[in-house]
Image (tube, rainbow, N blue to C red):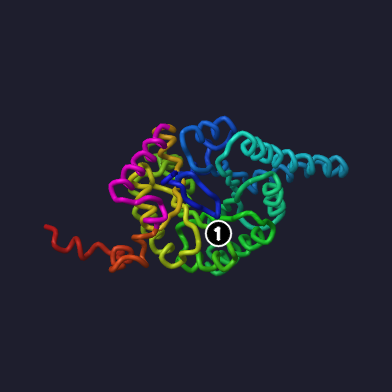
Amino acid sequence: MNRLKTKYLGLNLKNPIILSSSGLTSSLERIKSAEEAGVGAVVLKSIFEEQILSEVANVDSYSDYPEAADYLREYMTDNSLGNYVKLIQDIKRECTIPVIASINCIDGGHWVDFAQVIETAGADAIEINIFHLPTDKDLSSEVIEKNYLDTIGSIRDAITIPLSVKLASGFTNPLSIVREIYYRNIQGVVLFNRFYAPDIDIEDMTMKSAGVFSSQTELPNIIRWTGLISGSFPLIDIAASTGAHSGEDVIKLMLAGATAAELCSAIYEKGLSVIPEMLEFMKEWMTRHSFNDTKSFVGSMNVANIDSTVAYERTQFMKYYSNLR
């Protein structure tokens, strides 16, 4: 019996570790290596709405030759997506783990058609990553959230395979957003997305990128929202992302209510060998605590299953710091 098996988005995973969308999932060779190392599923490197639509826009220079422009527009759209479709087909032919496609978008539009093509190619599910930095001071949160939910709804209506939404952590009320996502028949959410962040070199006086890898210091925030969301919406699957760097971290996330954990930074930093190490720790921990399967403990420490919710809800340190000298 495979004690580590789990279900995520209705998919049967041999274990809860998912290799998240990144350069690590950009080719068949890398995905085959990840499968050999033991991952339960992969999320393909994202195909970007802007990537495809910008290529199409580049043909505007052929405005004096409309027939040529139409031909190039159709070719570039098909070719951009064609590489992605071929990757899905190759993985499905040569690997046995579930393949989750990833679309990074800003709003609804032509790319919704791409989701249908991805489904036809054989993807087992699609993960949607929606984010547009709100730099317009006149744009209300209500408008942003409506656009977010309208986009999700248009994709849900276009495909039949499972759909998950990778959430940004900046919503005023993540529980409200997840409720609306659930009402739209979305099977899962990923907590949370990590975005490019700027930094400043104070000697050169230039802008640069901040660190791109997550750290374990980010894990408590993921535990908080995993515990709150899974306790409030037990029928929606949660894949916890960001901050998990060990088997112990994955166990914590599952106790809080995640049925899977998406890993990226830990594998970039330590290599694929970290995966069997994590899986071995998880099996040993389950043995010590007499758990025969993951269903026996997933969500057992979310907000609905503990006597006190203070640990999840407290946001101020004053109580703890007041007695320090």
Above or below, 46 relative to 146? above
Residue at the location (48% across, 39% down)?
39
Say what amino acid the circle numbered 1 marks: Gln
Per the image, the residue denoted by label 1 is 187
Q: Secondary structure at mark 1?
A: loop
Of the 4 image quadrants, the one containing the N terminus is top left
Quadrant of the drawing holding the C terminus: bottom left
Residue count near mark 1 (Cα–Cα under 10 Å), binned few <14, some 14–19, many ≥20: many
Residue 64 in percent (x, y) is at 86, 42
Q: Is residue 169 left or right of residue 67?
A: left
Give the farthest residue toward the left: 325
Question: What secondary structure prevails in the magenta region?
Answer: helix
- Using the rendered image of the protein, determine whether residue 245 is visible from the camera's viewpoint: yes
**Where's residue 181, x and y in %?**
55, 64
Q: How many marks?
A: 1
Q: Residue at image x 40%, y 52%?
A: 294
The front one of 20 and 92 is 92
Magenta-drawn stretch contains 294: yes
Q: Nearer the viewer, residue 275 or 209?
A: 275
Q: Can residue 5 be found in the magenta stretch?
A: no
Q: Give the residues drawn in magenta, as a range.
A: 273-298
Which residue appears farthest toward the front when viewing the image?
1
Q: Tell which of 291 and 78 is nearer to you.
A: 291
In the image, taking residue 290 as reference, residue 118 lies left or right, namely right
Q: Position of residue 213 (x, y in %)?
A: 42, 41
